């Protein structure tokens, strides 16, 4: 029996072998920096969470500050459009808190606890934002400020629940105090 020779064209070999060589080089490069890549991904996640936490705490403190200042609170209760726009911008941030955390995708193992704490903080921020919206409408309609007082508690609980220590945020907190 004579061996069967398949006709091989030069173009066929290039199309078959070239992708294999590229894949091999890519895999070799990735495996060489595997540990470092994980560390960089974890640091990127931490920095993204840090940005999220700073924005959420800043918005909560802005809202709280608006109601702590007697003149601003009176203006809000009186329907001051400019101050309501500023308030609503902060409330929108707080209302979308959990979307911001979930947009960061899966947390690296060392930040899973921080992510869980962040989502708990979001529950407080989102509830507080909803109560402020309802409470401001009620107060402007002459129904009292009970909901606004409850909202302040939720915002405070949200600030407390932000995983400051897990994200190494203490420097940011000290700067905003």
Image (tube, rainbow, N blue to C red):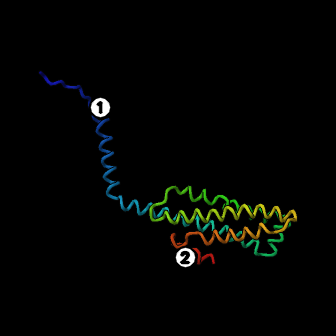
Q: Position of residue 135 (x, y in %)?
A: 79, 64
Residue identified by numbered label 2: 171
Q: Position of residue 154 (x, y in %)?
A: 68, 68
Q: Which mark is residue 33?
A: none
Q: Position of residue 96 (x, y in %)?
A: 65, 58
Q: Which mark is residue 12?
A: 1
Taking 171 as reference, is 90 above or below it?
above
Q: Which of the two discs, 1 and 2, sits closer to the camera?
A: 2
- The quadrant of the image that shows the C terminus is bottom right
Rendered residue at 37%/62% (across/down): 36
Q: Is residue 102 left or right of residue 2?
A: right
Give neighbour class at mark 2: few <14, some 14-19, many 20+ (Cα, 10 Å): few
Q: What's the distance in space between the residues labelled 1 and 2, CA to CA? A: 60 Å
Element under disc 1:
helix
Rendered residue at 29%/31% (across/down): 12
The count of marks equals 2
Q: Position of residue 51 (x, y in %)?
A: 57, 65
């Amino acid at each position: 029996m004579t061996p069967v020779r398949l006709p091989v064209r030069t173009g066929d070999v290039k199309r078959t072998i070239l992708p294999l060589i590229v894949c091999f080089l890519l895999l070799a490069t990735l495996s060489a920096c595997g540990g470092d890549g994980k560390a960089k991904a974890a640091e990127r996640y931490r920095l993204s969470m840090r940005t999220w936490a700073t924005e959420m705490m800043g918005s909560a403190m802005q809202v709280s500050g608006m109601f702590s200042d007697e003149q601003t609170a009176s203006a809000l209760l009186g329907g001051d459009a400019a101050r309501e726009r500023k308030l609503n911008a902060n409330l929108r941030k707080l209302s979308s808190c959990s979307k911001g955390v979930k947009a960061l995708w899966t947390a690296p193992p060392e930040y899973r606890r921080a992510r869980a704490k962040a989502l708990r903080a979001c529950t407080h921020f989102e509830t507080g934002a909803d109560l402020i919206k309802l409470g401001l409408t009620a107060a402007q309609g002459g129904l009292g400020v009970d909901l606004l007082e409850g909202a302040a508690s939720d915002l405070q609980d949200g600030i407390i629940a932000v995983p400051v220590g897990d994200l190494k945020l203490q420097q940011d907190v000290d700067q905003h105090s």
